[in-house]
Image (cartoon, rainbow, N blue to C red):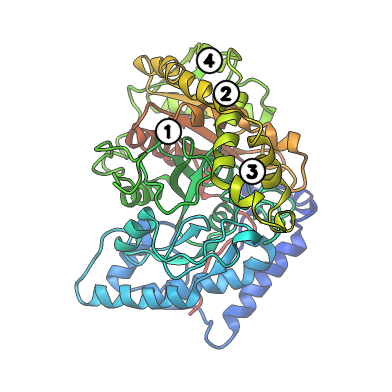
Amino acid sequence: MTRVDVESCGKNEDENEKPGLTRRDFTLASASALAAAAMPGYAFAAKAGGAMPMSISEAGKRMRDGSLSCVDLTKAYFHYIELYQPKLNMFISQLKEMALKTAAERDAELKQGKDRGPLHGIPILVKDLYDMAGTKTTVGSKAFVDRQSTEDATSVHHLLEAGVVVLGKTNMNEFAAGVSGTNAYFGDCHNPWALDRSPGGSSSGNGAALAAGIGFGGTSSDTGGSIRVPASWCGIAGIRPTYGLVSLHGLFPRAYSLDCAGPLARNVFDLGLLLDAMAGYDPKDKHSALAQRTSSYTKGIKDGVKGMTFATVKNYTYKDVDKPVADAVAKAAEKLKSLGAKIVEVEIKPLEGQLDYNKLFTNILLYEFNQILGDKYRNTPNAADLYGPIVTNNIAAGSKVSKEDYEKTMNERPAIIAEVKKVFDKVDALLTPALPTTAPLLKASAQDYGRGRQFTIPFSYTALPSAVVPCGFDPQGLPIGLQIVGDHFSEAALLRMAYAYEQATDFHKKHPPIFAQTIPS
């Protein structure tokens, strides 16, 4: 097994001694993997070349040329899940039997000449608020621990039809309430870059697993940052699409007017492949956007950014941002400029403190969450034992938001969206940090976690799409994410921009000490 170059990730030996991710942890993880590889049945697969494929395209090529089977790849992932689940707590439920059965079917299909496309045989993850027939969908809650799904969420159905293999249902903040990755019932999820740090949430299991090299992508959701936060803090790629682009049918809601479904992946091209399968109009979802999807989110992705205009926002992009993050974003802007793009500064009054986005967003979020879950909570005799404190507090706060205040906030929303959208008459995209900090300690205060909302909530409220891609590391070796925000339904352009930046840098090639690297057989 090849040793991870920890120092290339911005860490020195002393920094690897920080609590939660010591050199001893790393050595034990490596030793465990080597020991497993030496055991009968776990010798390196000469036919497969030993190395884990790093992209969907690479895995697909190897499956099609016969050098790797879907079954072997799926078994390899479960080998690493067995090793890393105790440390990272990525999964609420593992679907090993179902996954291996599906993998065998995908191998048989290829032998018969049936190829479902680029996702054929590709192992992925499903956040545990997506329904999937034959599985439990707990939404991360003790109250729903026995909730059985009888049908697939629309986007899961599309992915299965495209040929994916689902490894398991991943850990999350209860009812997607929060960005910490903590869960009182199923246990906290840990960041593979530093085990005492948050992986971000609420799509915490997806973020941690993908950063650790497990799976090629994950179905995630984002109300106020639940795709973008784990992408940034785990050093992977994510896209929150325009509201309505991906069906919400079969996802347990957090807030109907704010929720978005989208993918996480280790690289931008894979995001495009996953979005190709997930996006599209769905008559089962009344919020679904009719005829707005692009034919392919990977077509043109390699066309570069020459001639494009990116904007930083005055009194916003670098305001109240930790210095390592601000420096990384500034360098990212310079890198885009070196690729032929133009960088300008713009003023957007609604983003410069003119509006209290936190209040506007929270009025909608809490009111709708109370409408979704409040009655069930209040009619449950032992609710305090079944629901966590954040959910309990959210429902209590939501019950105090009047219908009049909610409707006022909703009625103001179109004008605010129109005001922010004007900037896209002049520029192609906005640049901001994904978050003003790197990953805080898992047990950080609510105030520490709350700092991240300044760059996620405004674009949730305005329903604008945004992509996140790694753009650096802080002095502790923790990842930093760049957020690229575009106009409504500009996902193809956003992925093109993110891909150009990603390919011009090496940040997406860096891996944490806990990382799946070899294929046991």
- Residue 521: x, y in percent? 48, 80
Could you tell whether 21 is left or right of 480 in the image? right
Q: Secondary structure at mark 4?
A: helix
- CA–CA distance in space, label 1 to label 4: 17 Å
Q: Earlier in the sequence, mark 1 or mark 4?
A: 4
- Residue 519: x, y in percent? 49, 72
Residue matched to label 2: 405
Q: Quadrant of residue 503?
A: top left
- CA–CA distance in space, label 1 to label 3: 20 Å
Q: Earlier in the sequence, mark 4 or mark 2?
A: 4
Residue matched to label 3: 178
Q: Earlier in the sequence, mark 1 or mark 3?
A: 3
Farthest-out residue, bottom: 40
Name the residue: 25% across, 63% down. 116
Pointer 1 with pointer 3, Cβ within 8 A: no
Three-letter residue code for mark 2: Asp
Name the residue: 71% across, 55% down. 195
- Residue 340: x, y in percent? 37, 24
Q: Earlier in the sequence, mark 1 or mark 2?
A: 2
Crowding at label 4, few (<14), some or many (≥20) Cα neighbours within 10 Å?
Answer: some
Q: Earlier in the sequence, mark 3 or mark 4?
A: 3
Residue matched to label 4: 350
Residue matched to label 1: 465
- CA–CA distance in space, label 4 to label 2: 20 Å
